[in-house]
Image (tube, rainbow, N blue to C red):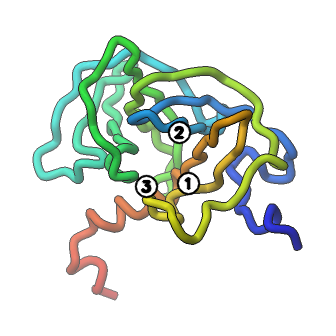
Amino acid sequence: MSAQDDVAPAAGWTGAEQVEVLTFELSGELFALDAVRVQEIIDLAPETVVPGADPFAGSVINFRGKVIPLADLRVAFDLEIGAFTIDSRIVVIEIELDGEQTLVGLRTDKVHEVTTLERSASEAPPSVGMRWRPEFIQCLVKRKDEFIVVPALQAIFNQHQDARQPVASQTRH
């Protein structure tokens, strides 16, 4: 078994050697999402802060007449949250939450491109030296002189959903 076999496949990599992704930037780091998850890329929208909500998804936006949560992966990766710029965008994705497909907006500093990544260029995150939680990273993909981080969105959202569950409901059977 090679080290590459140890990498859990990203959603689009199930059996595929290539996957189309949307690349975007957060605090100077390059990330990628499976392109099939992306519903739309929109300009920043007025948001409503939800009192008491987890800062990871602490507000909601109106997306085509539907209220959807707005998540910030910078919180999950403990990245600096800078000011919004003219390049800032919201990437609307669909992800399974509580057993249902749910639309969620993701804040980005800049959306770059849709591109193809090769599975052969992907690696599991190193076990030492990472400043981020390894379970939040699906894999790292080397492209030219840079690494692209493929976040484990399901793990990130599950962790933040578990954190918001009241203690009483977590222990009750």
Q: Where is residue 166 drawn, in percent x and y?
A: 22, 71
The structure residue drawn at horizontal position 58% and vertical position 71%, both measured from the top left corner, is: 127
Question: In front: mark 1 or mark 2?
Answer: 1
Q: Is label 2 in a helix, a strand or a loop?
A: strand
When asked about the image quadrant of residue 50, the answer is top left
The structure residue drawn at horizontal position 42% and vertical position 38%, both measured from the top left corner, is: 104
When asked about the image quadrant of residue 116, the answer is top right
The residue lying furthest to the left in this view is 51
Residue 152's disc is: 1
Foreground of the two, 87 or 11: 87
Residue 94's disc is: 2
Residue 157's disc is: 3
Dots 1, 3 in contact, CB < 8 A: no
Question: Separation of disc 1 and disc 3 at Cα?
Answer: 9 Å
Foreground of the two, 43 or 129: 129
Question: Separation of disc 1 and disc 2 at Cα?
Answer: 14 Å
Q: Is label 1 in a helix, a strand or a loop?
A: loop
Q: Residues within 10 Å of mark 2 (few under 14, many from 20)?
A: some
